[in-house]
Amino acid sequence: MKKNIHYFLIPLIILLLIEFFSFIIITFYPILFNLPHKNNFLVRDFTEKVDDKRIVTMKKNLKLNNIKDYSNANLVYSIYTDHIGARIPRNDSNFKNNSKIFLFLGDSVPFGMYKDAEESFPYIFSISNTNYKIINGAVPAYALPQAIARFDLEFSKIKNIKYIYLQIFDPVSQYALYQGNWSQTDSWAFTQIKMLEVCKVFKNNQFNFINKMNTFKIIAKIKSKFNYCSIKPINNESDQSYLSHIKEQIDELIKINKNIKARLIIAPVVVSPESTKTLNKSYTHALNLINNYLEDRSRQKNEFIFFDSRKFLDSEEDFIDQAHLSIIGAKKVANYLNKVINNLN
């Protein structure tokens, strides 16, 4: 009888020890496996959690200096925000309270991630357009629904908005990653939770309580790292869902803007020339679907201007990584945008 108890207790003790150490790893060293301990992956020093579609938003009246990117220690930058949580340069002389407003929405590209605000294209654009008050309302890691929700909740009541510029990357990366498993609620905010779900050890929902154990979360993460997850391939149904999602968000943007009557400018998803060569099929497919949709809709309905930055962001010097702009690329965007606005005026 004692031997039988030992056979039961020893594996149980080993399992509990493994679970304990897994808990320690996830709680205190989540970056080792890029695992979420709490639902706060987008909550950084410059953002704060909110309980709505934005998920996070920028902190207000912020002054952060000497920020270092964890993936590249050579990238050191600052982030300053004003009283409405818009990004501003240290010296906001070009961001004066002029009557006409030019609002920038989107993710880390218009935000100017990994660079000081002075090297972002909204700021460079402001230098030649001092008759506009520039509001950089972009937030790093925002997806399309978040950018539009921020416009609605934080900026739509601002008077005299004349232009709205929107540029995002997601849902491209999420659709490329999850393919047939993609859903319209996916975004960078929940990418780790989504990956744990796709790569969970036990597919039967009756065993979800086991999948939620820290040990099995780590196993799921290891599976995702080595591509051992069961991901459905892209299909017609998933394409239709993806395009429907994009359409619904653009419809929402146009609806919110109905009373504001600002000129809408939407840019495509752009990646560096080198990255274009190395993208896998699902990534290329997701990128082409959204860009083709935006370009076709702008031609057919004339609801917004399609600012096709793919035509001039054609050099590796324009980028510092796959999608973020160098000072050279930022100047190009600002100069071409300036030409578009001059032609409209």
Image: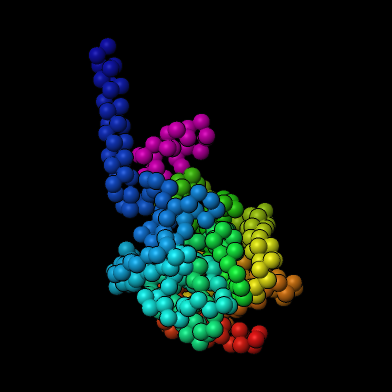
Q: What stretch is highlighted in magenta?
A: 200-222
Q: How is the image coloured?
A: rainbow
Please give left or right for residue 314 compared with residue 2 in the image. right
Q: Nearer the viewer, residue 338 or 225?
A: 338
Q: Position of residue 204 (x, y in %)?
A: 52, 35
338 up-or-down from 218: above or below: below
Q: Taking 159 as reference, is 121 left or right?
A: left
Q: Can residue 312 be seen in this view?
A: no
> What residue is rendered at 31% in x and 52% in y?
32
Q: In this view, does 119 lie above or below 179?
A: below
**Magenta-highlighted stretch: main secondary structure?**
helix
Residue 102, position in %: x, y? 56, 75
- Residue in the foreground of this view, choosing between 274 and 103: 103
Answer with the quarter of the image where residue 345 lies.
bottom right
**Residue at position x 39%, y 42% from top?**
217
Q: Quadrant of the N terminus?
A: top left
Q: Is residue 5 visible?
A: yes
